[in-house]
Image (cartoon, rainbow, N blue to C red):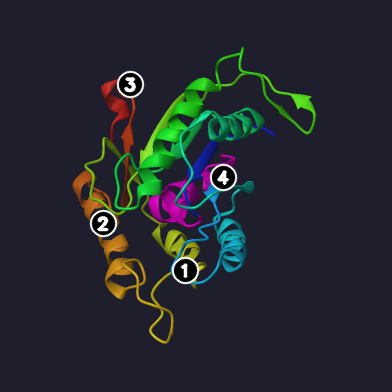
Amino acid sequence: MKLDILAFGAHPDDVELGCGATIAKEISLGKKVGIVDLTRGELGTRGSADIRDTEAANAAEILGVTIRENLRFRDGFFVNDEKHQLEIIKMIRKYKPEIVLCNAVDDRHIDHAKGSKLVSDACFLSGLRRIETEVNGEPQEAWRPNLVYHYIQWKNIEPDFVVDVTGFTDKKVEAIMAYSSQFYEPNSTEPITPIATKNFMESLVYRSQDLGRLIGTDFGEGFTVERYLAVNSLGDLI
């Protein structure tokens, strides 16, 4: 199955938090989008890996993605090595995306930067035909995505470009709140974490509003790039 966009996240909910509105918008435009989670988030303070499996499936349904898979790497302890790169290469060759979205290049959680570099490296290696992989006994062809973009997470990294996501922020918030074990719930007896506060949820919407303000729209999501952005003409910019 070929996808237009494949979004990777170190943990279930990373993709929703970082680029959920962009994904919802692209799907509304007819694009086929998939999500691959690297871990099950088993070290999370709240909830459990089994609960997050169910929450991730519910969030995927809300966003309308075509597929969602989990590579079950070790939360907190996966590394950027050949073993892990090959598993990601298999996903890239399996779904042949034109665009890959992945974690922030620098962030509070160590898995985010690790996941960012791991996926980025695998995107390059996936295009080398002498690296042989197979899925279900079938050999795979080399495939390299045209574009790799990094979404923004905890840290307020300055974006290289901003997507107008006006009209899709509510869908993003709905997908995030599918992870009811992880985020703010006033009656919860679970420990408080940095993302399980009212302030955190409000900050997500505010950031989107602020980025939207800066580009002259109501809401925006920011991304960083690995190479210069290219446009056919000045009129391509909004």
Give the residue type at disc 3.
Ala
Q: Which mark is residue 207?
A: 2
- Percent x, y of residue 27: 54, 46
* Secondary structure at numbered mark 4: strand
Q: In this image, 175 relative to 150: left or right? A: right
Give whichever of 126, 156 is nearer the camera: 126
Give the residue type at disc 4.
Val
* Secondary structure at numbered mark 1: helix
Q: Crowding at label 2, few (<14), some or many (≥20) Cα neighbours within 10 Å?
A: some
Q: CA distance from mark 3 to mark 4?
A: 27 Å
Magenta span: 12-33
Q: In this image, 52 relative to 219: left or right? A: right
Give whichever of 171, 233 is nearer the camera: 171
* Secondary structure at numbered mark 3: loop
Task: Kindly indicate whether the residue at mark 4 contacts the one at mark 3 (C-beta within 8 angstroms).
Answer: no
Q: Which residue is mark 4?
A: 36
Q: Is residue 238 above or below residue 179?
A: above
Q: Marks 4 and 1: which is nearer the front?
A: 4
**Magenta portion: prevailing SS class:** helix
Q: Which residue is mark 3?
A: 230
- Percent x, y of residue 224: 31, 36
- Percent x, y of residue 7: 50, 42
Q: Given the current orientation, which residue lies at the most extreme bottom position?
A: 187
Q: Which residue is mark 1?
A: 177
Q: CA distance from mark 4 to mark 2?
A: 25 Å
Give the residue type at disc 2.
Arg
Q: Earlier in the sequence, mark 1 or mark 2?
A: 1
Give whichever of 138, 73 is nearer the camera: 73
Q: In which quadrant will I find the C terminus?
A: top left
Q: Given the current orientation, which residue lies at the most extreme top position?
A: 130
Q: CA distance from mark 2 to mark 3?
A: 26 Å
Q: CA distance from mark 4 to mark 1?
A: 19 Å
